[in-house]
Image (cartoon, rainbow, N blue to C red):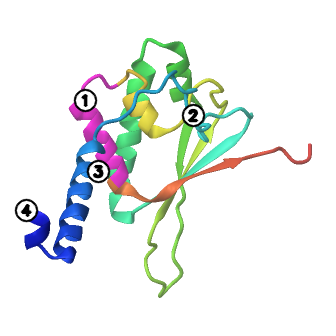
């Protein structure tokens, strides 16, 4: 008889370990819902624009500007060659400018380089999210090429993407 040879503490420990083992084993089993839950609402895409004038601001590492520029040159070229007219228009809408900041004498070199993307006129149907342009536009069917562009872009960025909606002032 087990209860006579084991102390109360040993029996409680064995019981606790047994319950824990059962809970761990059962945790992998999921009950099926009676009905499909409502689909989760997708968050709005901040780079799918509805206004008329926008600037995107990218901050880039100074030693990675050539990589950043080559990625965007490739993205624009591939979008321009796409059969879908809205992707061609999106490519044409992007005008890229590099801010040529000059450091004052004796000042340390800049820690980031700014690129402004003038979107004129901005697409109101497609996103300017580079991840979506690379992976969802259909312009990069070769996955290794898409992955290499994504990696190169990610490694070149010193910060995120900032969106500046603009409104005209005056006449």
Q: Position of residue 169 (x, y in %)?
A: 87, 48
Report the magenta residues as a range: 140-154
Is 130 magenta? The answer is no
- Inspect this view and state whether residue 58 appears: no
Give the mark toward the camera: 1 or 4. 4
Give the mark toward the camera: 4 or 2. 4
Q: CA distance from mark 3 to mark 4?
A: 27 Å
Residue name at image x 42 percent, y 17 percent: 82
38, 95: nearer the viewer: 38
Residue name at image x 48 percent, y 13 percent: 84
- Which secondary structure lies at badge 3? helix
Dot 1 or dot 4, earlier in sequence: 4
Mark 3 highlights which residue? 23
Dot 1 or dot 3, earlier in sequence: 3
The N terminus - image quarter: bottom left
Mark 4 highlights which residue? 1
Is 147 magenta? The answer is yes
Mark 2 highlights which residue? 42
């Amino acid at each position: 008889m087990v209860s006579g040879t084991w102390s109360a503490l040993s029996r409680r420990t064995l019981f606790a370990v047994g319950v824990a083992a059962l809970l761990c084993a059962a945790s992998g089993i999921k009950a099926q819902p009676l009905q499909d839950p409502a689909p989760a609402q997708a968050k709005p895409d901040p780079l799918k624009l509805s206004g008329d004038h926008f600037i995107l601001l990218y901050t880039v590492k100074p030693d990675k500007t050539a990589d950043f520029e080559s990625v965007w040159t490739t993205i624009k070229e591939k979008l321009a060659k796409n059969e879908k007219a809205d992707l061609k228009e999106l490519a044409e809408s992007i005008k890229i400018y590099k801010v040529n900041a000059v450091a004052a004498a004796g000042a340390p070199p800049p820690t980031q380089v700014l690129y402004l993307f003038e979107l004129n006129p901005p697409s109101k149907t497609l996103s300017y999210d580079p991840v979506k342009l690379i992976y969802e536009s259909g312009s990069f069917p070769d996955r290794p090429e898409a992955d290499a562009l994504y990696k190169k872009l990610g490694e070149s960025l010193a910060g995120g993407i900032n969106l500046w909606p603009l409104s005209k002032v005056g006449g």
